[in-house]
Amino acid sequence: MNDDIDQVLIGRDDLDRRVTEVARQIAGDIGVAASGVGAAEITIVPILTGSIIFVSDLIRKLPLPMQIHLVSVSAYPGRSTRSRGARIRSQLTSLPEDLADAHVLVVDDILDTGGTLGIVRDLVLRSRPRSLRTCVLLRKRRPAAMAFPVDYVCFDIPDVFVVGCGLDYNGYYRNLPDIVTLRQEVTAGADA
Ligand code: XMP
């Protein structure tokens, strides 16, 4: 697996440092939003599968009472390195119909076209949350991503295909602890 890596874009120590910073910011913002109207409680909505590593790191740095509701969306099926358009897998949505008391934080691994985050944001809004925030580990420096409204971004990266820390190619590499690019030979058959 390590032989397939071309470049390490973001190392594990930098990831950890930045996630700690963003968690502090989120905890502070939710605390302010909740002041005077009950507990600073938060409902986390991780977008599967790519956000699993990021969200597990992030929530352990958030000292707030929380619930977690999972949503599954697919945008890069199988051997693709370009978005095929996000689709929601509604049978894997555990969102309650009513989120009226909840400060919701939708968490995704990477913002590319904005299709995925847009779908989930609209889905959550239907449950009328008290507030809605969005958070991504990575945002690609491309016009669609930079123009898409998002509350918390850990890192802006070049517009390249990356894996690791939850991000995959054809289902593999999610367990790499750094954000990396793959050697060209590895993705040679992609998008054919
Ligand atoms: P959109 O276009 O909906 O894309 O903003 C977000 C989803 O697409 C996947 N994605 C990637 N997956 N390496 C990956 O492994 C990438 O460089 C990449 N760019 C987008 C990802 O599932 C994300 O949730």
Image (cartoon, grey):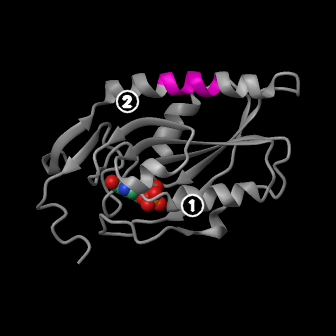
Q: Secondary structure at mark 2?
A: helix
Please indicate whether residue 28 sits to the left or right of residue 160 in the image. Answer: right
Counting from the top left corner in percent of width and height, residue 164 is at: 32, 45
Horizontal arrangement in the rendering, residue 39 relative to residue 95 (left or right): right
Between residues 46 and 86, which one lies in front from this camera angle? 86
Placement of the C terminus among the 4 image quadrants: bottom left
Dividing the image into four equal quarters, which quarter contains ligand 1?
A: bottom left
Residue segment shown in magenta: 20-27
20 vs 121, left or right, is left
Provide the residue designation for mark 2.
15
Q: Which residue is mark 1?
A: 72
Q: Looking at this view, is 23 or 78 the one in front?
A: 23
- Label 2 to label 1: alpha-carbon separation: 24 Å
Position in image of residue 54 (x %, y %): 47, 39
Which residue is at the front of the view, 36 or 38?
36
Majority secondary structure of magenta residues: helix
Question: Is residue 50 depicted above or below 73 in this figure?
Answer: above
Residue that sits furthest to the bottom in the current view: 192
Q: Residue at x 21, y 38 (%)?
A: 8
Residue 31 sits in quarter: top right
Q: Is residue 61 visible?
A: no
Q: Quadrant of residue 105?
A: top right
Q: Are marks 2 and 1 in contact (CB under 8 Å)?
A: no
Helix, strand or loop under label 1 = strand
Amino acid type shown at disc 1: Ser
Residue 51 placed where, x, y %?
49, 47
